[in-house]
Image (cartoon, coloured by chain):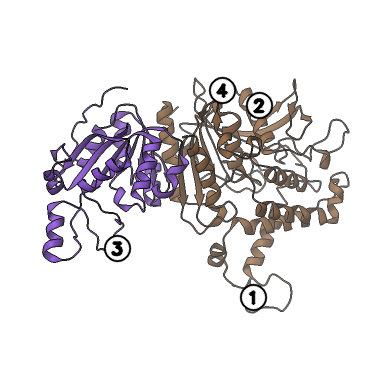
Amino acid sequence: MMDATVIPPRTDIRSDLRRIADMVSDGARVLDVGCGDGDLLDLLTRVKGVDGRGMELGMDGVRACVSRGLSVIQGDADTDLKEYPSDAFDYVILSQTLQATRDPRGVLLQMLRIGRRVIVSFPNFGYWRVRLALLLTGRMPVTDRLGFQWWETPNIHFCTIADFTALCDDLGGVRVERSAILDHDGRQLTSNAASWWANWSGEQGIFLLRRD
Amino acid sequence: MITPPAPLDSSGAPSSALPGRRMVLGADRPMPLDGGGQLGPFTLAYQTYGTLNADKSNAILVCHALTGDQYVADRHPITGKPGWWEMLVGPGRPVDTDRFFVICSNVIGGCMGSTGPHDVNPATGQPYAIDFPVITIGDMVRAQALLIDALGIDQLFCVIGGSMGGMQVLQWAVAYPERVFAAVPIATAARHSAQNIAFHEVGRQAIMADPEWRDGAYQHAGANPARGLAVARMAAHITYLSEAALHRKFGRNLQSRQAITFGFDADFQVESYLRYQGASFVDRFDANSYLYITRAMDYFDLAAEHGGQLAQAFRVGAKGTPVRFCLASFSSDWLFPTSESRAVVHALNAVAANVSFVEIETDKGHDAFLLDEPEFHQVIRGFISGCADHRGLKRRV
């Protein structure tokens, strides 16, 4: 497989999606779990020429994807990943969805079984604004990225960047091949997820995992 | 231009030739049948739309449902109604006849020009009636494959159909994976459910209980079990709708009267509607054909030949099927519910096949696949157009 090529910046594509796409090799087989309206799949198909599939819980998203020519099924990451055979994909991507699954650890294990590599992006609950909001107001933080009240949020399993790397260690046989810690505007702050600075200043983290 | 011919005569056979194309197949070598025995020579009646491109790569086969026929986008020669899928098939439509060459054939066992039980058995000189061999969805598709051969087409760009048409689509993809680029099974299932077999049995019993059926030999006697066939249609028609759709359309409204009559006339609009559906159906359909085609659906079980493992049906050698699938179901369809489509999707996922699946929200029941459902049409357009780009087909022939 060819090396990953750098994607020219496009203002209309979310910066975290562009960074995820940067991690994917040309022509790879990709499963995007929780693919939404298909923006990432579409980007990967157009720019990286991947053989892309998607799974999305919401029917509106599924219909939007299929209508734009993407191969997407309605499905639930918590229950439907088990249908796929092992090593079926080069990359399995979970973008901004981990925190909304019932069993994040189980979902990660399934993804690592299905794909040779796994890309996960999630909002960092250790971000300083989140920490300060809880510290100063004593209320669950509501930010523009996490714009839900606690009683309505689909995000039921928040974690920090430190929590996530600890989980990866705990899983065993999983190596963090690359990571990118992004600030509020999607700029990369650091690629060293292990530093306290990353967990304090990063609004979201992107991890490229690989089975050892 | 198509001039409507006379309707079926009392024997159930077309009283004059129906418009459209015919192909005689299996003349040199009869076609083997799943039930044993063989058929041939036999005729398939079919319609085509659009132009076949130079490398014959833009052909789409449309498979019709139980009571459908080949007039997918033509005015029907008997009823005078628009083609049954004109909303989906035509110039600029999701199945775009400016871009694709569309073929639709009447199934074997049918009564719109393809060989069926109303035709004369060359061995006896009499109509086959119930001596016609029992056919399967596999046999229907085998016959279509012979037609595609005869048209010189190696690979169909797409096979699409709903309900029994969807069963044929699945059968095509499993029997001829190398001959199908994309498959669109709509509102269908990989096997006919017990409930669906039960409804079909009610329909068949209604036909066979009509004294005019005469053990199937009604044509010989110049009779026609029209009442039995009409009742079969009425029962089946209920299964194509939903409680919500029936309520929305009719409620408990009375038919041309102010009050109930305390009798057995069609007091309610819904009764009148069903009676009309039954009565108009017999003008265009043959009772024995109805027996044969419902039986073919009952016997359909795609996993049966693969040890009951549906995923095995989609395995080609050591790999998953190369066919690209798009399945669609409708939320209020209780005849072929979403769970049936999902079972097919799970089997396709198990072999890592390329599959899309959409459930359309509607209260129109199973019939929704034939009706004005913009979201459904948008999905089909997106999938087919995406596949065509992938296949390298030009926007216009």
Q: Which chain carries label 4?
A: B
Q: What residue type is labelled 1?
A: Arg
Residue B1 visible within the image: no
CB atoms of marks 1 and 2 within 8 Å? no
Left or right position of A183 against B268: left
- The answer to whether any part of residue A172 appears in the image is yes
Residue A90 image-quadrant placement: top left
Chain assignment, label 3:
A
Q: Mark 2 points at which residue?
A: B146
Q: The brown chain is which one?
A: B
Q: Residue B257 carries which label?
A: 1
Query: Quadrant location of the C terminus of chain A?
Result: top left
Whether the residues at callouts 3 and 4 have beta carbons within 8 Å, the answer is no
Asked if badges 1 and 2 are on one and the same chain, I answer: yes
Letter of the chain in purple: A
Circle 3: element type? loop
Instruction: Return the disc, 2 or 4, that comes first in the chain's sequence.
Output: 2
In the picture of the structure, the residue carrying the numbered disc 3 is: A152
Q: Which of A131 and B255 is in front in this view?
A: A131
Q: How far apart are marks 2 and 3 (CA)?
A: 58 Å
